[in-house]
Each structure stands twice: as C-alpha cells, then as structure tokens.
Amino acid sequence: MRVRVLSSPLFIFLRRVAALLPAFVGAAISFWWTPRRDTLGFQCTPLLPDIRFRVHDGLRPQPPILSPPLATGKPSPAPPDAIVLFDGTSLANFCTATGAPARWSLQNGAATPNGTGDIYSRQRFGDCELHVEWATPTPRLRGQGRGNSGVFLMERYEIQILDSWRNPTYPDGQAGSIYGQSPPTVNASRPPGDWQTFDIRFIAPRFAGERLREPAYVSVWHNGVTVQKHVAIRGDTVYMAVPRYHGAAATGAIRLQDHGNAVRFRNIWVRPLPRK
Ligand code: MG
C-alpha cells in the first residue's frame, strides 16, 4: 500500500512542487526587495506620514517651472554683521568630518567637491540665515546624478542642490527641496553653469531633554524666489526612508555635500539669529 502511494502520480507531482518551493520563495523575496521605480522615483518606499505620497515619489506633482528663467545675478555682498564662511580665497573655515582641513578644489574663487568628502563649517550654528551661491557643471548624466550636492543645516537636514534645469526627477529630490520630504513650490532653476543662490532661514528644533518639543522650520529662497515657506522639517535627511529626529543638539555645522559632481560654490555667509 505504502509503495503504491509513493509511486502515485499525485505524490510525484507534489514532490516536484515541494522541490521547486525554495526557488519560488527566493524569487518572491527578491521581487519584494528589488526597489520598484516609477519613471522618476520610487513606489516601494514608505508613505510620508499625514500625506498620500511616498518618500521620493515620482508620481508626486512636479513643481511648476518658472519661465522665463531668472537672470544670473552678481554675488550678493554679505551684510556687515554676517560671518563669512567662504569668500573664494580659503576654505580655512571648513573641515572634514574628522576635523582635518577641507581639501576641496579651490579655483577662480570657487570651491568644488573632488571626492574628498563632505565639508563642515568649523563653527556650529542653530537658528540662522544662510546665503550660498552655487553652479552645476556641464550635464553628463540625468536625474539625481546631475549636479547633485546639498547644504545640510546642523549637518543633518539637507536642502538639495541639483541641476534641475530640464532634468526631471522625483519632486522631493529637486533643487530647493528638503530632500526626501518637501518639494520646492516652484522650479526656479537656472541652466547649468549659471550661478544660482540659496537664501535660507532656519529655526533649529527644540528638545526637552531627549524629547522633541518643536521641529525645525525652514524657509528657502532659490534665486530670490520662495520655494519653502516656513516648512516643518520631519527629521534627519535619509534616503528611501521616513525621516526621524536623532539626538538633541541645539547647533551643528553647515555641511556641504560631495556627491561626486563638480558643483562650484562661492560667497557663503551666515547670520546667527537670536534664539527665542
Ligand atoms: Mg544632495
């Protein structure tokens, strides 16, 4: 009787199915973990709390493009009470993550990342106004690979720098976005090679001990146009994940990102704001 069961067609079929099961499970796991992209971003990332879009959601509405583009401006002089972090002559006010002197390329009054990593202002700031001028290089790639850099407030909240001139990508990764969180309200980008400006007003998060009492808020003007208006920052900048606050620091460095693209920087100054 047992021999007849073992040699029955049904048993043989079930045995073959069982033998293939690990391969099916492996393929299903692999499919599940492979980042599923829409045309411009991702549809496998978590939903941002309280809105219906995912982190780096390519289906999120694109910011309208300002047309005609804004004319390139001259460097705007630092106010008398500003702390000049970079005037085109020296990177002495910046260092590496370990405190070593910053080693970005310095040429024709501009500093350019060169693969030596992000640079950090030696001085730390909380509430402040920040002015940064930047220009993206001749485009070679598309999307996030094109003119990518960034200004990190308190070294952890990134305002994205990107060549967003005729370069579609997910809205929360465009120039002037709070990266991974809030797209700019408009695309105020100038063409690659043109100098562009960020003027940023930042209010640091408030903590009671280790507990977040009030999130950070930021306003950003890109080439003089408001692209973030007193927007609450959701937490530390992260890739493909929901941002959260970590630590309870009141101040941090101004950090400039080396994302492997030769974005030039000039004329960087900051005005600390009195802490209320
Ligand atoms: Mg970036």
Image (cartoon, rainbow, N blue to C red):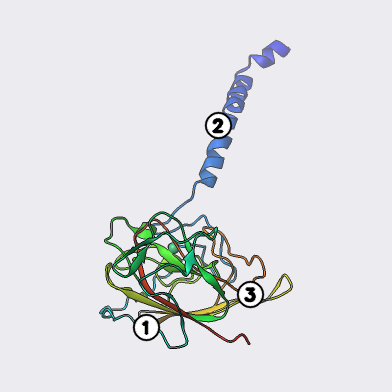
Q: CA distance from mark 1 to mark 3?
A: 28 Å
Q: Residue at 64% across / 71% down in the picture?
A: 249
Which quarter of the frame holds ligand 1? bottom left
Tag 1 secondary structure? loop
Residue count near mark 1 (Cα–Cα under 10 Å), binned few <14, some 14–19, many ≥20? some
Q: CA distance from mark 1 to mark 2?
A: 56 Å
- The earlier-in-sequence mark between 1 and 3 is 1
Q: Residue 228: image x %, image y %?
A: 46, 79
Query: Of 124 and 34, which appears nearest the observer?
Result: 124
Q: CA distance from mark 2 to mark 3?
A: 51 Å
Residue type, mark 3 in image: Ala
Q: Residue 143: image x %, image y %?
A: 36, 59
The numbered dot on residue 250 is 3
Residue count near mark 3 (Cα–Cα under 10 Å), binned few <14, some 14–19, many ≥20? some
Residue hosting label 2 = 23
Q: Residue at 33% across / 68% down in the picture?
A: 110
Query: Of 1 and 201, which appears nearest the observer?
Result: 201
Relative to 28, is 80 above or below? below
Relative to 108, is 144 above or below? above
Residue contact between numbered discs 2 and 3, judged by CB atoms under 8 Å: no
The numbered dot on residue 224 is 1
Residue type, mark 1 in image: Gly
Note whether residue 132 is visible: no
Report the side of 214 relative to 85 (left or right): right
Q: Residue at 29% across / 66% down in the picture?
A: 166
Report the side of 82 relative to 66 (left or right): right
- The earlier-in-sequence mark between 1 and 2 is 2
**Under 8 Å from ligand 1: the CB of mark 2?**
no
Q: Quadrant of the C terminus?
A: bottom right
Report the side of 169 relative to 216 (left or right): left
